[in-house]
Image (spheres, rainbow, N blue to C red):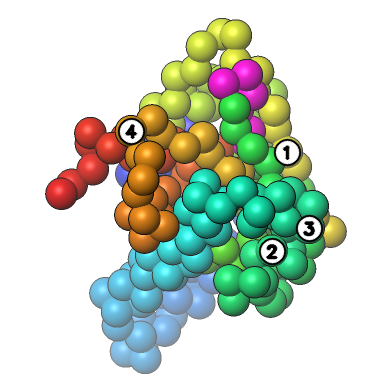
Amino acid sequence: MAKENDHDHEHSHLDEMDIRLRTLESLLVEKGYVNPDALDAIVETYEKKIGPRNGAAVVARAWSDDAYLDRLRKDATSAIAELGFSGRQGEHMRIVENTDEVHNLVVCTLCSCYPWPVLGLPPVWYKSAPYRSRAVSEPRAVLSEFGVNLPESTKIRVWDSTAELRYLVLPKRPKGTEGWSEERLASIVTRDSMIGTGLPVEPKDQTP
């Protein structure tokens, strides 16, 4: 398995639903009902921009408001709904927090359960068979392939998302962000950091 921007693995190990969707898309494109570029743009927007921005707002609020963080720990679904993010696929939420001692990684081993209200559409690799199996059996190797190399002393905890319970990783707040506004904090929160396959953008690497 490779990073998201390495596409070799994305077109293998497709499950039956993926195959059906791709077949339907091909037929619609062939008949001229769908513009493939427009479709790609819509998917790109919901997968990487609109959805993850919601989750980033949740993380930024938790980083900057201890009272909110406490509510998030006690009842993540309600706390997330306070910010206007709720609905189907987001009814049963739990926050898992990264620390110096523990790094959390989310997977759905049976299908592709995913918190749509806060993360948007699940990426293709999240639904792939290699990720769903290897995230459990060799999480450290998987993280390394995503560019996340953790100290051996850091424990990796894998959470299996289900229809009854979905997880959102609360990444560690990077040093050097003290005094930042919530909007600026949200700008360094990546979608992958809320799944556990990535980390927030370091302040020194942020585009001005």
- The residue to which callout 1 is attached is 159
Q: Counting other residues with Cα less than 10 Å from the Cα at mark 3, is it few (<14), some (14-19), or many (20 or more)?
A: some
Q: In this view of the protein, can residue 98 be seen by the observer?
A: yes
- Three-letter code, disc 4: Gly
> Tag 2's secondary structure?
helix
Residue 75 numbered mark, or none: 3
| Residue at 64% across, 24% down | 102
Q: Is residue 103 magenta?
A: yes
Query: Disc 1 versus disc 2: distance between alpha carbons?
Result: 20 Å
Q: Given contact means CB atoms under 8 Å apart, are the residues at marks 2 and 3 in contact?
A: yes
> Tag 4's secondary structure?
loop
Q: Which residues are magenta?
A: 100-105
Query: Disc 1 versus disc 3: distance between alpha carbons?
Result: 18 Å
- Which of the 4 image quadrants contains residue 72? bottom right
| Residue at 66% across, 54% down | 67
| Residue at 74% across, 63% down | 77
Instruction: Indicate which disc, 1 or 2, sits on the residue closer to the N terminus.
Output: 2
- The residue to which callout 2 is attached is 79
63 w.r.t. 114: above or below:
above
151 sits left or right of 200 in the view: right
Instruction: Indicate which disc, 4 or 3, sits on the residue closer to the N terminus.
Output: 3
